């Protein structure tokens, strides 16, 4: 009898322990969920208008970030249909010139070149740069390619012409068709600065176009997806270009992981992916806290602004 | 003694239970903590784009494969049929409707086409109304409107209507009378943005042509903003996605209205098109098969030319005075093309045409005898007939070209080279013997 009591007590202790642990688990998860909702609410992501077209600061943007600049404008003014004549975007270099000459209040652009920094110094201006968008430099190939991952060294060797067959990377026995981007394009500059870091690259595949008048144009071949192909560009550009007609359908192009890190919004945001960079809000450092540029910059960097970044297809910094 | 031993034994069991129970509690706490950690991670999971989800470590819903992949072309030696449709050129010249364009000095002339030959006359009527109305849309702003048929095959009809001031396009599924959405030309996994970018790339390259210069090396041209222009084009495409103007042909798709002055600052930029070269995207092209139907939709299905190789345009459709004699695989390893150039409707040419048929039959027998099972042959021949001034004798002019290759190459790659060869201007073509 006594033994039976002892066994019952032991079993009861075990069951009580399990019940207590389950209670702790569910309480913890529910508490976390409530805190998350409260945090999101505290950020007050609303869509109320905070500007009109008339009082919206003058903004310029590099071509890659013009869709983002437009997205901010539309959200902050609450106006969806804006006449194209309103937009006076130029490109990166012209935008920096306009900021230096006080023709615009704020830019969304890539880093300034040394020439642009020097020009600003001449005019007594110092840029203040705040990251607004994270960007990754990615490599892509046909979805049927057996190779999913490469090391940084392997990527460099492909573009130096030292690795020429996919079987050297564990893939099919196929010569690597390493497409390149047009000379001096954003992607080409990105390859040289972020990946190759000063190493020489092999000559790009080229082709001839011939017209009915027998005139020939010899040009760098643009990426055309095949089983043995590899190409590169920035993450936003790649996602835009290689988006299938139907987003529910698997793409026939895949992004390669580098050093076993897959390029996605998380790994680019937290810099675990090896090739990352950013686009910046750029203003005059001398602008005070009540200036139009600084207020707009703060709005862009707020939770609402970061949601606009995500909704526009870019990677937010927060 | 017995009682003391028993007590000692029970104490040992009790201590053992406490130790085991303590270990159990520690494991339980560890498992609870692990469960909380993974659940919080799951709550914080971020959204993924279609590209990254292919190889992501995070468990995501598996993407579907394209259901319409069945419409894709799988091999360059597949064929298509031209439609058995009559195309009637119709003119509204100063208010008079006629099939004759015989007014040399009209105030206005609107050229549109009408079709005849569909079994379903209601659909035919609706299509004819659309063809007419589209031409008159341009006529609102301009006095001279022309219509050009760019595609009449695989149950599709594509027309380009143009005037001094602009262009309109119309693409019709002949089996239903409905307009064909641009994206339906491709299978649903196609990356159309990239195709448009490639098409713009070639357009931008061609824009660098200079008079008197035959060869341009693009490394000497500033291409630094080309990718930016590709993105501008894609934005224009997305903004107009429900109203894309385009025409199709067996080998390319021309897309209009996506280039603006920011992309290319030229005169009449609104009439400029970019050309998607279909041969580059063979596995993504759905248009050849999407609109085919099991039932015959034509009154007389024998009119249209059959079995034309995909991505090629049969020369006979472009010229009324070219008669196709052969355009088919003679047997699995022989492909033959024969044309008669010229208008030989008069009875006096009948003897010459009989002789041409005899020459053609002899050549076919020769080809079969010459081509062993491990070889493939492409054969092209043109005939024309000339006669002397007194018409007492005729000369049959024959030009022949032949290329042979291994059977493996014939089956795998030869048709791709054949298609590309047809795209090269005649003066730069050469036939060669594959080994």
Image (spheres, coloured by chain):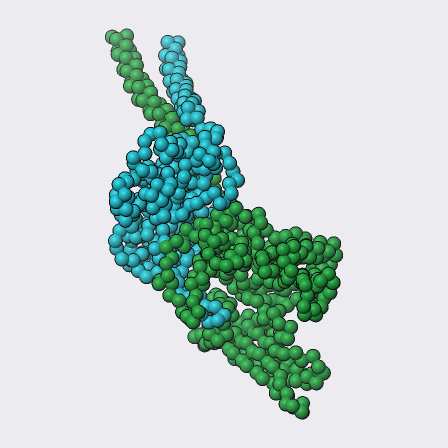
User: Could you say which chain is coloured cyan in the image?
Assistant: A
Question: Which of the two residues, B282 or B114, is positioned nearer the viewer here?
Answer: B114
B107 with respect to B314 (left or right): right
* Residue A42 appearing in the image: yes
Q: Nearer the viewer, residue A59 or A248?
A: A59
Residue A59 x/y as whole percent? 40, 40
Residue B85 appears anywhere in the view: no
- When asked about the image quadrant of residue A108, the answer is top left
Which residue is located at x 60 percent, y 76 percent?
A: B339
Q: Position of residue B185 (x, y in %)?
A: 56, 54
Q: Residue at x 49, y 45 (%)?
A: A85
Residue A161, position in %: x, y? 30, 59
Residue B381 x/y as whole percent: 56, 78
User: In the image, which lettered chain appears green?
Assistant: B
Looking at the image, is B5 positioned above or below residue B154?
above
Q: State how many labels appear.
A: 0
Front residue of this view, candidates A138 and B61: A138
Quadrant housing the C terminus of chain A: top left
Q: In the displayed structure, would residue B129 be above or below residue A69?
A: below
**Residue visible at 26% across and 12% down in the picture:** B8
Instruction: Indicate whether A5 appears above or below B242.
Output: above
Residue B264 appears left or right of B85: left
């Amino acid at each position: 009898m006594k033994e039976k009591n002892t066994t019952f007590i032991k079993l009861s202790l075990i069951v009580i322990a399990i019940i207590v642990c389950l209670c702790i688990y569910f309480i913890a998860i529910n508490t976390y969920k409530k805190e998350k909702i409260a945090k999101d609410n505290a950020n007050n992501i609303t869509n109320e208008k905070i500007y009109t077209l008339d009082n919206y600061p003058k903004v310029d943007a590099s071509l890659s970030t013009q869709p983002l600049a437009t997205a901010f404008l539309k959200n902050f003014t609450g106006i969806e249909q804006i006449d194209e004549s309103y937009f006076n975007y130029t490109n990166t270099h012209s935008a920096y010139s306009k900021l230096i000459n006080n023709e615009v209040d704020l830019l969304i652009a890539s880093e300034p070149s040394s020439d642009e920094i020097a020009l600003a110094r001449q005019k007594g201006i110092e840029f203040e740069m705040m990251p607004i968008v994270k960007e990754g430099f990615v490599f892509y190939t046909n979805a049927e390619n057996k190779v999913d991952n490469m090391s940084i060294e392997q990527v460099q060797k492909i573009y130096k012409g030292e690795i020429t067959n996919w079987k050297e990377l564990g893939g099919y026995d196929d010569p690597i068709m390493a497409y390149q981007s047009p000379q001096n394009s954003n992607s080409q500059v990105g390859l040289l600065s972020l990946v190759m870091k000063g190493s020489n690259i092999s000559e790009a595949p080229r082709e001839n176009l011939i017209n009915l008048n027998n005139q020939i144009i010899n040009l760098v071949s643009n990426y055309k997806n095949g089983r043995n192909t590899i190409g590169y560009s920035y993450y936003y550009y790649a996602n835009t270009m290689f988006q299938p007609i139907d987003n529910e359908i698997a793409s026939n192009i895949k992004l390669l992981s580098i050093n076993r890190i897959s390029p996605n919004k998380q790994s680019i945001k937290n810099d675990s992916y090896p090739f990352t960079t950013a686009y910046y809000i750029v203003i005059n450092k001398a602008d005070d806290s009540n200036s139009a540029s600084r207020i707009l910059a703060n709005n862009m960097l707020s939770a609402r602004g970061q949601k606009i970044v995500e909704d526009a297809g870019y990677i937010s910094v927060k | 003694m017995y009682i003391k031993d028993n007590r000692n034994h029970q104490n040992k069991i009790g201590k053992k239970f406490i130790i085991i129970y303590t270990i159990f509690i520690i494991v339980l706490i560890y498992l609870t903590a692990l469960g909380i950690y993974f659940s919080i991670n799951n709550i914080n999971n971020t959204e993924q784009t279609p590209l990254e989800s292919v190889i992501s470590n995070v468990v995501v819903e598996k993407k579907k494969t394209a259901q319409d992949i069945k419409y894709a072309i799988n091999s360059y030696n597949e064929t298509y049929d031209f439609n058995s449709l009559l195309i009637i050129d119709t003119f509204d010249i100063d208010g008079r409707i006629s099939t004759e364009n015989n007014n040399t000095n009209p105030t206005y002339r609107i050229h549109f086409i009408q079709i005849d030959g569909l079994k379903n006359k209601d659909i035919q009527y609706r299509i004819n109304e659309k063809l007419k109305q589209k031409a008159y849309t341009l006529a609102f702003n301009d006095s001279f409107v022309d219509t050009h048929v760019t595609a009449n095959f695989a149950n599709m009809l594509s027309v380009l209507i143009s005037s001094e001031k602009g262009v309109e396009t119309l693409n019709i599924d002949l089996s239903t009378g409905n307009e064909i959405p641009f994206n339906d030309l491709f299978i649903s996994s196609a990356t159309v943005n990239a195709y448009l970018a490639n098409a713009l790339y070639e357009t931008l390259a061609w824009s660098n042509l200079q008079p008197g210069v035959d060869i341009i090396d693009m490394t000497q041209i500033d291409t630094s903003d080309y990718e930016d222009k590709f993105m501008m084009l894609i934005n224009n495409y997305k903004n107009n996605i429900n109203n894309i103007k385009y025409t199709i042909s067996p080998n390319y798709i021309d897309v209009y209205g996506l280039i603006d002055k920011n992309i290319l600052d030229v005169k009449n930029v609104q009439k400029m098109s970019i050309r998607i070269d279909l041969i580059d995207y063979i596995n993504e092209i759905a248009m050849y098969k999407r609109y085919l139907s099991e039932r015959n939709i034509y009154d007389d299905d024998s009119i249209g030319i059959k079995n034309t190789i995909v991505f090629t345009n049969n020369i006979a459709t472009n010229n009324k005075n070219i008669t196709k004699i052969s355009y088919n695989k003679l047997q699995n390893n022989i492909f033959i093309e024969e044309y008669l150039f010229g208008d030989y409707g008069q009875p006096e040419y009948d003897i010459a045409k009989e002789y041409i048929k005899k020459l053609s039959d002899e050549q076919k027998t020769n080809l079969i005898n010459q081509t062993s099972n491990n070889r493939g042959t492409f054969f092209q021949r043109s005939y024309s007939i000339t006669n002397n001034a007194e018409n007492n004798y005729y000369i049959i002019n024959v030009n022949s070209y032949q290329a042979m290759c291994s059977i493996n190459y014939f089956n795998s790659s030869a048709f791709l080279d054949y298609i590309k060869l047809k795209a090269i201007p005649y003066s730069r073509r050469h036939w060669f013997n594959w080994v």
